[in-house]
Image (spheres, rainbow, N blue to C red):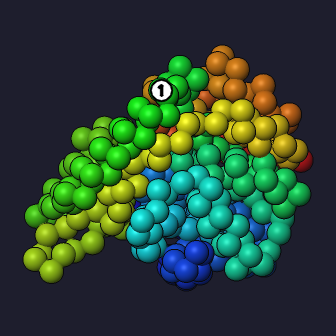
Amino acid sequence: MAFFSGGSGPTSHTFFSQRLRLNYVDYGSADKPLMVLVHGSRDHARNWDAVAGRLVKDFHVVAPDLRGHGDSAWAVGSPYAMSEYVLDLTQLLGHIGKTPVTLLGHSLGGAVVLNYAGVYPETVSKVAAIEGLGPPPELINNDPVDKRMDNWIEEMQGMASRQPRQYATIEEAAGRMLEANPHLTKELAEHLTVHGTMRTEAGSYVWKFDNYVRAWGPQKYDYEAVTRLWSRIDCPALLVRGSESWASNPEEDGRATHFSNYSYAEVEGAAHWVHHDRFEEFMEALESFLSTP
């Protein structure tokens, strides 16, 4: 099965942000309105292949590898903070030089596109986030700053000696991905693994992402600041959740009230990777949202 049905496949390009060489893939249709797809943590741009294949008929589709992910550079000494990811998206859009833009993000990428849309609402025509609202309110860490700092320092010291897990074959690595998300088909797990791993000199395979992207900085999650950005989004917003996900329902926990113009879609039978777990149902919700004036 070809996961991108729009032609021979996307082309890879580079741009720069904070002196980092970052990668993005372009699925084509440059004469159409721009749509940027932003992946989640420990993922990569090519996870969007099937989604992009459906969108290229109407959009110029582009997907970046976030810093520390995929074929983008690792940020040495960086906390991989949300502000830096938003900066990178801003630099990408400046590099492409095309607005307004439609944005779609998953998980971390969903948070990135919502933050960007709150900072620069005039540049965004529509925004969709798959489980991109950050931690549910009950999971926000309210530990005092000294404890958060101590925990973070200990985590950083542990990261220094952590070695990437190595796999003898692509199939073995894909098996690990299936363990993490049993909703995936074997074929899709292998596709994601082929683009998400690199072969070492010793002949084994390791994930492309920087292990340091697993850690968040010691700063407290600023719920007030995040909800202010959500309230500044004046374009239509689509909030998507999988019914079997750990993420809470934003209409029930109150987070959706901070959006002035939103719609909500809960996809039955899907967990956190909604666009993989129930592709057709997700695309139906997305395409309906995109086609509504």
Q: Residue at label 1?
A: 143
Identify which amino acid the numbered label 1 is placed on. Asp
- Badge 1: how crowded within 10 Å, few (<14), some, or many (20+)? few
Q: Residue at x 78, y 48 (%)?
A: 118
Residue 108 visible at all: yes
Q: Is residue 264 left or right of residue 157?
A: right
In the image, farthest residue toward the top:
252
Quadrant position of the N terminus in the picture = bottom left
Residue 10 visible at all: no
Residue 147 spot, x, y in % from top left = 41, 32
Residue 293 spot, x, y in % from top left = 89, 47
In the image, farthest residue toward the front:
146
Q: Is residue 184 above or below residue 11?
A: above
Q: Is residue 31 left or right of residue 181?
A: right
Q: Is residue 214 above or below residue 92?
A: above
Q: Is residue 250 above or below residue 127?
A: above
Residue 70 spot, x, y in % from top left = 41, 68
Q: Residue at x 65, y 64 (%)?
A: 87
* Residue in the foreground of this view, choosing between 154 and 225: 154
Instruction: Count every numbered label the image shows and give the total.
Output: 1
Q: Residue at x 63, y 52 (%)?
A: 112
Q: Residue at x 75, y 58 (%)?
A: 102
